[in-house]
Image (cartoon, rainbow, N blue to C red):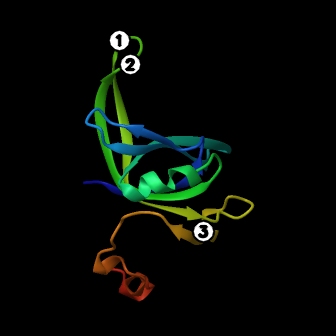
C-alpha cells in the first residue's frame, strides 16, 4: 500500500456522488503547485472520500479551499471517450483537513484548522512521536 499526503487547493466544489452499489462518496479535484525547471507547474489529483463525515463535510468544501488529504493511491484501467484503454491514479482519502496555506500558498506555514476525516492515528503518528529525536532515520 502506498500511503500519501497531498496538500493543495480544490479546483471546484466537492461533488457528492453515489456508486453503482448505492454508497455515497465525495469526489474532488485537488491542485498543487510546484516550481520545476524555472516555471510553476500545477499537478491535479482525483480524490475520492467516503464515509459519513465526508458526506457531511462536502457542502463546506468549496473551490479554492486549501486541504490536506491523507490516503492511499489506487490505479485502475478504464476506457476513455475515444474507446482507448487509459490508466487513472486516484487518491482514496481516509482523512481530510482544511489548512491555512498563508497568502503565498507556502505549505511550510500549514496550520490545521479542522480535522474532517475519519483517520485514527497509529501510536507512532501522534504528535509526541514526531520530534526530530524520535525519527528512525
Residue at which label 3 appears: 110
Neighbours of disc 3 within 10 Å: few (<14), some (14-19), many (20+): some
Identify the element where label 1 is drawn. Answer: loop
**Disc marking residue 44:** none
Neighbours of disc 2 within 10 Å: few (<14), some (14-19), many (20+): few
- Find residue 130 and report its image quarter: bottom left
Q: CA distance from mark 1 to mark 3?
A: 42 Å
- Marks 1/3 in contact by CB < 8 Å: the verdict is no
Residue 100 position in % (x across, y down): 64, 65
Q: Earlier in the sequence, mark 3 or mark 2?
A: 2
Q: CA distance from mark 1 to mark 2?
A: 5 Å
Residue at which label 1 appears: 83
Q: Residue furthest top?
A: 82
Image quarter of the C terminus? bottom left
Residue at which label 2 appears: 80
At 25% across and 36% down in the image, what residue appears? 21
- Marks 1/2 in contact by CB < 8 Å: the verdict is yes
For residue 4, say whether it is visible: no
In this picture, residue 50 sits left or right of residue 62 = left
For residue 7, say whether it is visible: yes
Residue 119 position in % (x across, y down): 35, 66
Q: Is residue 65 above or below residue 18?
A: below
Q: Which residue is nearer to you in this view: 70 or 22? A: 22
Amino acid at each position: 500500500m502506498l500511503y500519501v499526503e497531498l496538500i493543495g487547493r480544490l479546483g471546484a466544489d466537492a461533488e457528492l456522488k453515489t456508486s453503482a452499489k448505492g454508497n455515497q462518496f465525495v469526489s474532488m479535484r485537488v491542485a498543487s503547485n510546484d516550481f520545476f525547471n524555472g516555471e510553476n507547474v500545477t499537478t491535479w489529483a482525483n480524490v475520492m472520500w467516503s464515509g459519513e463525515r465526508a458526506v457531511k463535510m462536502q457542502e463546506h468544501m468549496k473551490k479554492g479551499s486549501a486541504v490536506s488529504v491523507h490516503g492511499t493511491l489506487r490505479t485502475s484501467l478504464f476506457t476513455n471517450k475515444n474507446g482507448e484503454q487509459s490508466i487513472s491514479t486516484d487518491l482514496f482519502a481516509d482523512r481530510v483537513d482544511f489548512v491555512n496555506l498563508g497568502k503565498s500558498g507556502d505549505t511550510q506555514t500549514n496550520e490545521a484548522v479542522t480535522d474532517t476525516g475519519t483517520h485514527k492515528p497509529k501510536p507512532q503518528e501522534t504528535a509526541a512521536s514526531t520530534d526530530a529525536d524520535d525519527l528512525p532515520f
